[in-house]
Image: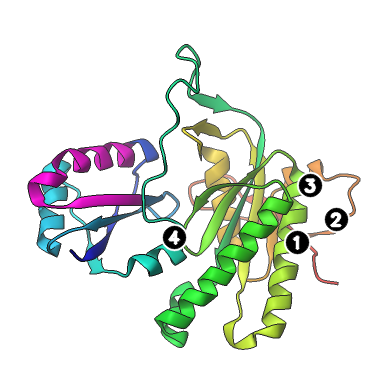
């Protein structure tokens, strides 16, 4: 059977509501001859993507309509290899091993963390300009390079959005070091491959997000995403808390003034990390 990916515009959805809808789909998939493979939730954009084997697009619509009523806005046939290259996986993550967490312990944790978002500039335009096959190679390079640097700086990948990453650190200075290393590595790549250049914006903040099932939620996550949205390609923007936590380190910060952020009442002062020699 062909492989389909669909997109739902789900403004206001939460990770919990999306996970619940996915479970409802799983309960009815056999009725429509569909085999759901996995899904992705981009909370900042209010978008949900589902990947599945299905006999026809109409069966996908019928399944979602009966299961939870969220009919996809777009359905397209895809190459599973291309999807894995862009989004990192084509199957649901493995569930936690039974008994790994004592029954009397909560699955929700709140602790102070530094959060980093990365976002690639013009990811759609890259595909249009280079064509599918060459664009896949660019995305593979982007993913491999960033994941290698995350590993070197103890960054924990929380979410891969296809053209960016959400990452958690226990140290603000580690996050800034990591962001600088990413931009420097991409600058080297772009000098060597200007026809396939990769330009990334990065935002960093810190606070106490809520963690559940190895995912992070809350205002700290949302604020970091908004900071990333304000950054220009090749730029690193951070919240004042990051600058304060890096006091005494060798980083150079430039005051970029206050910015209004969608969903937040008060403007936020931002600082640019100077990473270029």
Q: Dot 3, crowdedness within 10 Å: few (<14), some or many (≥20)?
A: many
Q: Which residues are magenta?
A: 17-39
Residue occupying image coordinates x 74% and y 76%: 188
Check contact, mark 3 vs mark 2: CB within 8 A. Answer: yes
Quick check: 87 left or right of 138?
left
State how far apart marks 2 and 1 are (Cα): 10 Å
Percent x, y of residue 125:
46, 80
Q: Closer to the N terminus: mark 3 or mark 4?
A: 4
Q: Secondary structure at mark 1?
A: helix
Does residue 24 sit above or below 97 in this rendering? below
* Quadrant in which the C terminus appears: bottom right
Residue drawn at point x = 66 percent, y = 32 percent: 112
The residue labelled by disc 3 is 173
- Residue 133, image quadrant: bottom left
Q: Which residue is mark 2?
A: 251
Residue named by callout 4? 87
């Amino acid at each position: 059977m062909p492989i389909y990916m669909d997109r739902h515009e789900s403004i206001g959805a939460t990770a919990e509501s999306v996970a619940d809808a996915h479970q409802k789909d799983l309960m009815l998939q056999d009725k429509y001859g569909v085999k759901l493979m996995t899904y992705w939730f981009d909370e900042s954009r209010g978008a949900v993507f589902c990947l599945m084997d299905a006999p026809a697009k109409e069966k996908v619509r019928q399944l979602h309509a009966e299961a939870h009523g969220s009919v996809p806005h777009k359905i397209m046939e895809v190459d599973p290899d291309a999807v894995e290259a862009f989004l990192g996986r084509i199957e649901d993550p493995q569930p936690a091993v039974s008994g790994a967490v004592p029954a009397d312990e909560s699955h929700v944790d709140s602790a102070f963390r530094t959060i980093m978002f990365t976002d690639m500039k013009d990811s759609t335009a890259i595909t249009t300009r280079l064509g599918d096959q060459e664009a896949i190679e660019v995305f593979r390079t982007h993913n491999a390079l960033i994941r290698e640097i995350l590993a070197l700086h103890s960054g924990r990948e929380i979410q891969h959005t296809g053209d960016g990453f959400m990452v958690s650190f226990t140290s603000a200075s580690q996050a800034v070091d990591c962001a600088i290393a990413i931009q420097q590595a991409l600058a080297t790549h772009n000098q060597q491959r200007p026809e396939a250049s990769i330009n990334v914006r990065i935002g960093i903040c810190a606070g106490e997000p809520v963690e559940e099932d190895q995912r992070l939620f809350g205002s700290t996550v949302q604020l970091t995403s908004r900071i990333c949205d304000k950054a220009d390609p090749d730029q690193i923007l951070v919240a004042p808390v990051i600058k304060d936590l890096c006091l005494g380190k060798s980083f150079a910060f430039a005051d970029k003034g206050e910015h209004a952020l969608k969903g937040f009442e008060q403007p936020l002062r931002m600082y640019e990390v100077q990473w270029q020699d």
